[in-house]
Image (spheres, rainbow, N blue to C red):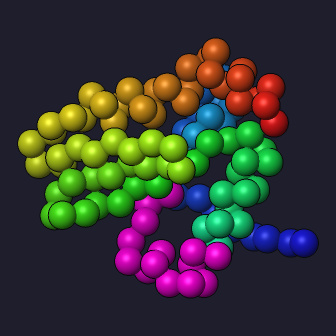
Amino acid sequence: FFFSSSVDALITNKDYKPCLVVEFQSTYHDSHDARERDNKKLHLLKLAGVPLLYSRIKNFGLLHLYSQNEEVIFNLFTGEKRDNAKALIRNYCEPSNFANVLAIA
């Protein structure tokens, strides 16, 4: 099994260890082939112990950050709920949460 791919955004902790990947989704990702590639990427990142969030702009200016378990929406124009989005991303890179992810993997 060989799979070559890249990620859109890799976020590291202060020690430069990967703690989160964010994939920017567009309508291109709605195709069957793209969903299949995204699913492979999700499984490989799970094996590596690195969480994956998706990002997609919907309803003109609403940024959705989501995973299989959670979703945060914030308005890019007004900034409404920006703190929720920041908190979601920071949560993955907290030292105690990162240690738990590695322990599970």
Of the pair 91 and 69, the residue shown nearer to us: 69
Q: Is residue 25 magenta?
A: yes
The extreme bottom residue here reads 32
Q: Which residue ends up furthest to the right in the rendered image?
A: 1
Q: Is residue 105 left or right of 15 when viewed as pictured? A: right
Magenta region, mostly helix, strand or loop? helix
Q: Residue at x 51, y 44 (%)?
A: 69
Please state the horizontal and vertical placement of residue 56, each as a whole percent of the image: 35, 60
In the image, residue 45 lies in the stretch drawn in magenta: no
Number of numbered markers: 0
> Where residue 101 sits in the image (x, y, percent)?
71, 30
Vertical placement of residue 81 versus 65, above or below? above
Residue 86 as seen in the image, left or right of residue 3: left
Relative vertical location of residue 41 with respect to residue 45 in this rendering, above or below: below
Q: Where is residue 17 in the image (x, y as percent from the top left)?
A: 69, 32
In the displayed orientation, state which residue is furthest to the left. Answer: 78
Q: Which residue is drawn at 65% across and 66% down?
A: 39
Question: Taking the image as drawn, is residue 10 in sight?
Answer: no
Q: Which residue is drawn at 58% across and 48% down?
A: 52
Q: Residue 81: give x, y in percent of width and height.
A: 21, 35
Q: Which residue lies furthest to the top in this view?
A: 96
Residue in the image at 62% along x and 17% along y: 95
Q: In which quarter of the image is residue 49?
A: top right
**Picture layout, residue 102 above or below residue 52:** above
| Residue 69 seen in the figure | yes
Left or right: residue 35 versus residue 42 is left
User: Which range is magenta?
Assistant: 23-36
**Quarter placement of the N terminus:** bottom right
The quarter of the rendered structure image containing the C terminus is top right
